[in-house]
Amino acid sequence: MAQLAVVLLALFAQMERTYTLERAAHARAVATAKDRRTGRSSVVTESQIAHAVQLRDAGATAAEIVTKTGLTRSTLYRHMPPRPPEPVTVAAPAPTAEAVAQSPTPIPEVAGGPRPTGDRLACPTCGYRPSTRQEEAPHLDDPA
């Protein structure tokens, strides 16, 4: 008899739990149909979030924002909108003609000859570029 009583009590508890869940789901459906919010009301106001965003944009740390707004850190992070993405790198602008003309390291001019081409195999005095290394050695040994 005791075992039957325990089984019946467990059955009634299970039925009551099922009916409770059904009533709660129905109440939520009715509330959302009437555009009402369900659940616990929020402790965060729009003015607190706006103030926190303003402080963050001004460069305040999270600890300073928590102190000034009165919100907890987890609530602050949950309700703060994300920062806009910033570009990781920025391409350097191409140098203008004025910037090239005013460069701090101008290319030296060689008296009586052409400017060096920047080629390391070219002769710095006359600009001659040998086609082979065998031609390069005599030319560099005899600059005249």
Image: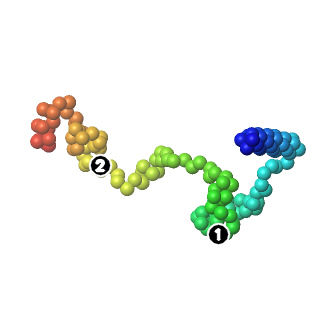
**Is residue 50 among the parts visible in the rendering?**
no
Is residue 32 left or right of 47 when viewed as pictured? Answer: right
Q: Which mark is residue 109?
A: 2
Quadrant hosting residue 129: top left
Residue 79, position as x, y percentages in the image? 68, 55
Instruction: Name the residue beneath numbered marker 1.
Output: 67
Mark 2 is surrounded, within 10 Å at the Cα level, by few (under 14), some (14 to 19) or many (20 or more) other residues, namely: few
C-alpha distance separating marks 2 and 1: 66 Å
Q: Residue 143 carries which label?
A: none
Q: What residue type is labelled 1?
A: Thr
Name the residue: 60% across, 63% down: 62
In the rendered view, would you say 4 is above or below 63? above
Residue 16, position as x, y percentages in the image? 80, 43
In the rendered view, would you say 78 is above or below 61? above
Name the residue: 12% across, 37% down: 137
Q: Are marks 2 and 1 in contact (CB under 8 Å)?
A: no
Q: Which type of secondary structure does the marked residue at label 2 adopt?
A: loop
Hey, which residue is sitting farthest top in the picture? 131
Is residue 64 left or right of 13 when viewed as pictured? Answer: left
Task: Report the front residue among 58 and 74.
Answer: 74
